Image: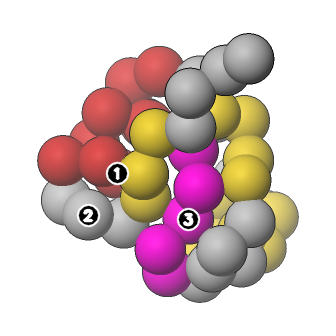
Amino acid sequence: MKVKMNVQTAYHGDLLRAGKVYEVDEETAKRWIASKLAEKVEEE
């Protein structure tokens, strides 16, 4: 699932920056969206 980060965070040793779009697993994405760390990106 693609998400746009609202905050900068480390994920599996990678640095995910705020404002950028990343691909993460669905379970993680749902947690981040629920806690406002990220927003879902609609796929085209």
Type of amino acid under label 3: Met
Q: Which segment is the magenta one?
A: 3-7
Which residue reaches farthest left?
34
* SS state under label 1: helix
Label 2 CA crowd tier, 10 Å (few <14, some 14–19, many 20+): few
Please give the residue where the numbered disc 3 appears in the rendered image: 5
- Measure the alpha-carbon separation of dots 1 and 2: 6 Å
> In the image, is 29 to the left or to the right of 4?
left
Closer to the N terminus: mark 3 or mark 2?
3
Please give the residue where the numbered disc 1 appears in the rendered image: 32
**For the N terminus, which image quadrant?**
top right
Which residue reaches farthest front?
44
> In the image, is 30 to the left or to the right of 1?
left
- Residue at image point 47% right, 21% down: 26
Type of amino acid under label 1: Trp
Colour style of the rendered protein structure: secondary structure
Q: Where is residue 29 drawn, in percent x and y?
A: 44, 37
Q: Where is residue 36 drawn, in percent x and y?
A: 26, 63
